[in-house]
Image (cartoon, rainbow, N blue to C red):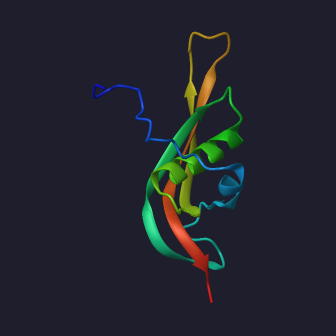
Amino acid sequence: MGLFSNKKNNDEKENTGSQQELDAIQLSTLAYIPGYKVVKSLGIVSTWNTSDRPINNGNDSLKETAIRIYPGCNAIIGCVPGISAVAHSGYAKDYFCYYISGTAVIIEPEN
């Protein structure tokens, strides 16, 4: 397997989480989730989608990325969404790119 190979080892499984796990992850544009405290900051996550897919897919994609990179993540704070136009794309219609990034964290309820 070369450096840029797309093949995966048999023991290297992609964990994108179940729908229940995705639904349990909270998103916030704030630096916190009201009623919770951040107990561990895991790192930055980001994703993008084109306009031919629903925007909600971007949120699920961000959550999937967080689960894959940082198992145990239960919230993403400081989310910053954006839209970028892709004019003259060569397709029958023009597309836009929806992107979102934030910080994956572990939270627990405040006492």
Residue at the limit of the structure toward the left, as seen here: 3
Residue at the limit of the structure toward the front, as seen here: 10
| Between 21 and 78, the one nearer to me in the picture | 21
Residue drawn at 54 percent across, 53 percent down: 67
Q: Quadrant of the N terminus?
A: top left
Q: Quadrant of residue 41?
A: bottom left
| Between 82 and 44, the one nearer to me in the picture | 44
Residue drawn at 64 percent across, 60 percent down: 25
Q: Quadrant of residue 84?
A: top right
In this image, 89 relative to 93: left or right?
left
Residue 55, horizontal then vertical, whole percent: 69, 39
Q: Number of labelled discs? A: 0
Q: Is residue 110 above or below residue 58?
A: below
Residue 35, horizontal then vertical, whole percent: 66, 79
Residue 8, horizontal then vertical, whole percent: 42, 32
Residue drawn at 63 percent across, 41 percent down: 58
Residue 50, horizontal then vertical, whole percent: 61, 29
Q: Quadrant of the C terminus?
A: bottom right
Residue drawn at 35 percent across, 25 percent down: 5
